[in-house]
Image (cartoon, grey):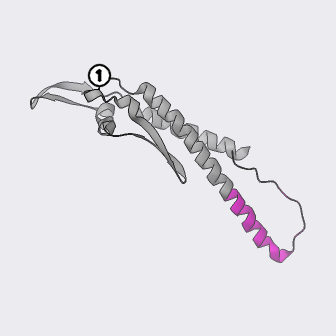
């Protein structure tokens, strides 16, 4: 968790006021960056776990299981949840549904299982709550 900015009561000269305000704002911005990054990573880990539980489970072509490939990466200012190769191409098809073809002929339709959109909504709400909670403490 980021460090808490302590308020200091001390006398300063009028010409130093701008410098002190800039210093306090710089400390606050750093605190927000640290807390934002920590909250994003925490939420990303939870979202990956959630997606692994709610993703469609099938036989897996060539031993590749879609639900196992959910992961996240963090970067300056946030984190990103994604499905690793080689199953990353399936996200849209499994979320929205698709035609089923064999030998070039359409033999049916596979209904989509919405699992990414609900996880994204939960992650957005959870991130906002965690960030606000961290900044208030």
Residue sitting nearer the eye, 111 or 42: 42
Seen at 55% across and 53% down, the residue is 77
Tell me the quarter of the picture where residue 87 sits. Answer: top left
Seen at 60% across and 48% down, the residue is 36
Residue 81 in picture, x, y percent from top left = 45, 41
In this rendering, would 74 be left or right of 18? left
- Secondary structure of residue under mark 1: loop
Query: Would you say residue 17 sits in the magenta stretch?
Result: yes
Q: Overall secondary structure of the magenta stretch?
A: helix
Q: Quadrant of the C terminus?
A: top right
**Please, which residue is most extreme toward the front here?**
63
Q: Quadrant of the N terminus?
A: top right
Residue 98 in picture, x, y percent from top left = 23, 31
Whether residue 122 is visible here, answered yes or no, is: no
**Please, which residue is most extreme toward the bottom here?**
15
Placement of 93 over or under 2, stated as above or below: above
Tell me the quarter of the picture where residue 23 sits. Answer: bottom right
Tell me the quarter of the picture where residue 59 sits. Answer: top left
Query: Would you say residue 18 sits in the magenta stretch?
Result: yes
Placement of 12 over or under 50, stated as above or below: below
Residue 67 in picture, x, y percent from top left = 38, 29
What is the tally of numbered marks visible in this picture? 1
Whether residue 38 is visible here, answered yes or no, is: yes
Q: Which residue is mark 1?
A: 59
Residue 34 in picture, x, y percent from top left = 64, 51
Seen at 47% across and 41% down, the residue is 72
How crowded pointer 1 is (Cα within 10 Å; few <14, some 14-19, many 20+) is rated as: few
In this rendering, would 46 be left or right of 54? right
Placement of 30 over or under 90, stated as above or below: below
In this rendering, would 90 be left or right of 17? left
Seen at 69% across and 63% down, the residue is 26
Where are the magenta residues, as a range? 6-29
């Amino acid at each position: 968790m980021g460090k808490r900015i302590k308020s200091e009561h001390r006398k300063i000269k009028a010409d130093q006021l701008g410098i002190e305000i800039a210093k306090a704002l710089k400390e606050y911005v750093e605190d927000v960056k640290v807390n934002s990054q920590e909250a994003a990573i925490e939420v990303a880990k939870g979202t990956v776990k959630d997606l692994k539980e709610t993703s469609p489970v099938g036989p897996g072509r060539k031993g590749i299981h879609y639900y196992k490939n959910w992961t996240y990466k963090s970067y300056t200012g946030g984190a990103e949840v994604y499905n690793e190769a080689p199953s990353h191409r399936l996200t849209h098809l499994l979320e929205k549904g698709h035609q089923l073809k064999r030998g070039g002929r359409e033999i049916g339709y596979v209904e989509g299982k919405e699992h990414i959109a609900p996880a994204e909504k939960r992650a957005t709400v959870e991130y906002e709550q965690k960030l606000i909670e961290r900044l208030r403490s």
